[in-house]
Image (cartoon, rainbow, N blue to C red):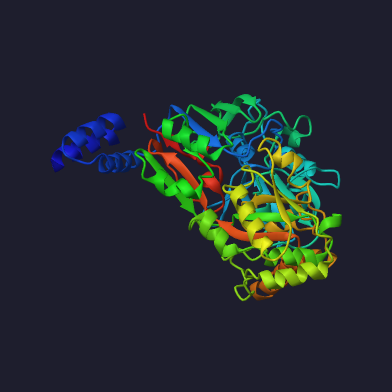
Amino acid sequence: MNEKLEYLKSRVAARKMSRREFVGRATAMGVSAAAAGSMFASAARAAGPMRGGTLRAGLSGGASSDTLDPALVASEATHGILRCWTDHLVNVSPSGEIVPRLAEEVGSSPDAKTWHFRIRKGVEFHNGKTLTPEDVVATIERHTGDEAKSGAQGIVKGIESMAIQGDTVSITLSQANADFPYLMADYHLAIQPNGGKDDPNAGIGTGAYMIESNEPGVRTAFKRNPNDWDENRGYADNVEILVINDATARTSALQSGQVDMINRVDPKVAGLLDRAPNLTVKNVSGRGHYVFIMRIETDEFVNNDLRMALKLAINRQEMVDKILRGYGSAGNDFPINAAYPLFDDTIEQREYDPEKAAEYYRKSGHDGSPIILRTSDAAFPGAVEAAQLFQESAKAAGIPLEVKREPSDGYWSEVWNVKPFCASYWSGRPTQDQMYSTAYLSTAEWNDTQWKRPEFDAMLIEAKAELDPAKRKELYSRMARMLRDEGGLILPMFNDFVDAISTRVMGYEDDPNGELMDHFAMQRCWVEA
């Protein structure tokens, strides 16, 4: 039998046998269907990437108000769409290294204050225009300035000037920053013709796929870019991204074969789904976190005693156990965990303490009216249930928390970063500097808790320029403690990224930078014939 199986596997490796035929023949020889599927996948992977077919993804987080403008990408669906048609100067690898992309070489001055990016030659945009250093400069310019409505606004604030010398873009910073290349990997900074200044919503990039049709909040269809500069991606002829916000519907779409991969698998069904034939659950721990955010400049949350009462009134471990089901860990009200190299593990873990929460609540002088916490299935898997658990644990402290469930469509434009108190999530960032600069710098567009402290900003700037790891760690520790004790962030749990794929999908690799291989799965995976 072994000889016959080896023969069948050789046929797979030569791309002369489909999964169905292989599994059928192997099971007729007494091999279980699960074992046969595993054998096929191994043989197919050994054969290397294959081109052709259509790859379909079902993603949560889409809405009818979505745009193709990279500056405004704020949810999983728009992030996944963006990855298909764009490129960046650099990417961050799963192991945390900088990977040159449109910048084929990166260097800096000795003081890490001026950075040089040599722009790759021979790259074409989807409209036929040749990529130039001027396009790079224009892209960065569009995300800067006080009027820029960009998720990258906070991380480009430190740019003092830009210059072009031949094929090289030189960027001089107001303060030295050893992590600056990581900032250029931010997904908002997708390179567009003339920086997107003419039409940021045009969907013209240099990526593996070209947009054929786009129905915001419903479906985006792509075809392979025939002039792609990178031959090691874009294996499918076509890619389709379907917005499926409901977790049950998303799971059903994968099980029925409507899609080949999904994000945001509900931890409650992950184990069951992983046992289903022809499906595999992929989970990886990283920097992602599920949160409840209080906007501290609003009348309701300007009082830090009330904020502290709510932080002490949440049962973090209960939430990890019941919502994450083992796919994550408890948080501590600042957005950094052990996935970051300069994490301070001596910061005391905040625990559920209803008596102390009640004491802070009385001290706050709150009038006893309901405190409205807005949530939605769009916020994160189990967000509604997590808010209800929070409501119950707060009740033990005498805090009148009221949960209001909002529609998924429009949640990211009408609730998050708008209403005083809501559920949200962050996928994290490769460095502490980038995480803090994106969401906690006073001037950041995505400062969703309205955290504005000059002393915090000053420490962030100082940390950027500090090349001594020990001194830098101390600065980050002080920032974390300040944010933990005074900020509007309630961070009960760090989540694993939990995806699921069909066994016909090949080339999938774990990536702690984000779900679905940091949303690169659509361009780096391939499907069997």
The residue nearer to you, when weighing 521 against 215, is: 215
In this image, 310 relative to 302: left or right? left
Point out the image quarter for the N terminus: top left
Give the residue at x 80% y 46%.
Answer: 144
Give the residue at x 63% y 28%.
Answer: 126
Q: Residue 422: where, in percent of width, then height?
A: 72, 50
**Quarter assignment of residue 411:** top right
Q: Residue 328: where, in percent of width, then height?
A: 52, 58
Give the residue at x 75% y 63%.
Answer: 176
Point out the image quarter for the C terminus: top left
The residue nearer to you, when weighing 428 against 493, is: 493
* Residue 15 visible: no
Q: Residue 481: where, in percent of width, then height?
A: 71, 71
Give the residue at x 74% y 67%.
Answer: 308
Q: Give the total number of marks visible in the rendering.
A: 0
**Quarter assignment of residue 216:** top right
In this image, 251 relative to 331: left or right? left
* Residue 57 visible: yes
Q: Residue 114: where, in percent of width, then height?
A: 74, 57
**Quarter assignment of residue 342:** bottom right
Q: Is residue 150 above or below residue 439?
A: above
